[in-house]
Image: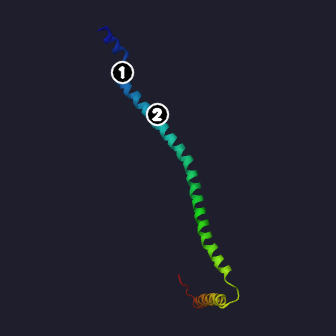
C-alpha cells in the first residue's frame, strides 16, 4: 500500500494537467500561426514573380508568333505588283472612310459610344 500512496503523491492535480496541456496547445497554435504567416510572406513575392514572368512569356510568344510570320510573308511578296498596290489602295480607302465618319460626327455633334 505504501507504493500506491507514493504514486498518488507524485501525480499532480488533474486540473493543473489539463491547464498545462491547454497552455501547451495554445502556444503550439501561436507558433504555428507565426510559422504560417512567415511562409505566406515568403510565398507571395514568389507567386507574384511567377505570375509576372508567365504573363511576359505568354505575351512575348504570342507577339512573336504573329509578327514573325506576317513579316516573313510581307517580305516574300515583291514590292511593285498588283497585289501590293491593291492592299495599299484598300488601306488608304479604309483610312479615308474612317476619317469621313469621324468628321461627320464632329459636324453633327453626335458621337457614337
Left or right? Give the position of 12 relative to 107: left
Few, some or many residues within 10 Å of mark 1 (<14, 14–19, 20+): few
- The residue that appears at 39% across and 28% down in the rendered structure is 19
1, above or below 43, in the image:
above
111 and 36: which is toward the camera: 36
- The residue that appears at 35% across and 14% down in the rendered structure is 9
What x and y, as percent, mark residue 37? 52, 44
Left or right? Give the position of 38 relative to 70: left
Q: In which quarter of the image is residue 11?
A: top left
Mark 2 falls on what kind of element? Answer: helix
- The residue that appears at 70% across and 86% down in the rendered structure is 79
Few, some or many residues within 10 Å of mark 2 (<14, 14–19, 20+): few
What x and y, as percent, mark residue 63? 61, 70
Mark 1 falls on what kind of element? Answer: loop
The label number, if any, that marks residue 87 in the structure image: none
Q: Name the residue carrying label 1.
A: 13
44 and 70: which is toward the camera: 70
What x and y, as percent, mark residue 58? 58, 64
Q: Name the residue carrying label 2.
A: 27
56 and 14: which is toward the camera: 56
Q: In which quarter of the image is the N terminus?
A: top left
101, above or below 34, in the image:
below
Amino acid at each position: 500500500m505504501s507504493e500506491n500512496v507514493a504514486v498518488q503523491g507524485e501525480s499532480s492535480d488533474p486540473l493543473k494537467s489539463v491547464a498545462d496541456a491547454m497552455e501547451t496547445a495554445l502556444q503550439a497554435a501561436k507558433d504555428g500561426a507565426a510559422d504560417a504567416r512567415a511562409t505566406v510572406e515568403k510565398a507571395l513575392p514568389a507567386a507574384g514573380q511567377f505570375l509576372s514572368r508567365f504573363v511576359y512569356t505568354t505575351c512575348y510568344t504570342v507577339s512573336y508568333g504573329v509578327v514573325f510570320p506576317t513579316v516573313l510573308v510581307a517580305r516574300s511578296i515583291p514590292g511593285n505588283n498588283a497585289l501590293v498596290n491593291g492592299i495599299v489602295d484598300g488601306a488608304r480607302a479604309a483610312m479615308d472612310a474612317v476619317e469621313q465618319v469621324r468628321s461627320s460626327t464632329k459636324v453633327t455633334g453626335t458621337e457614337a459610344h
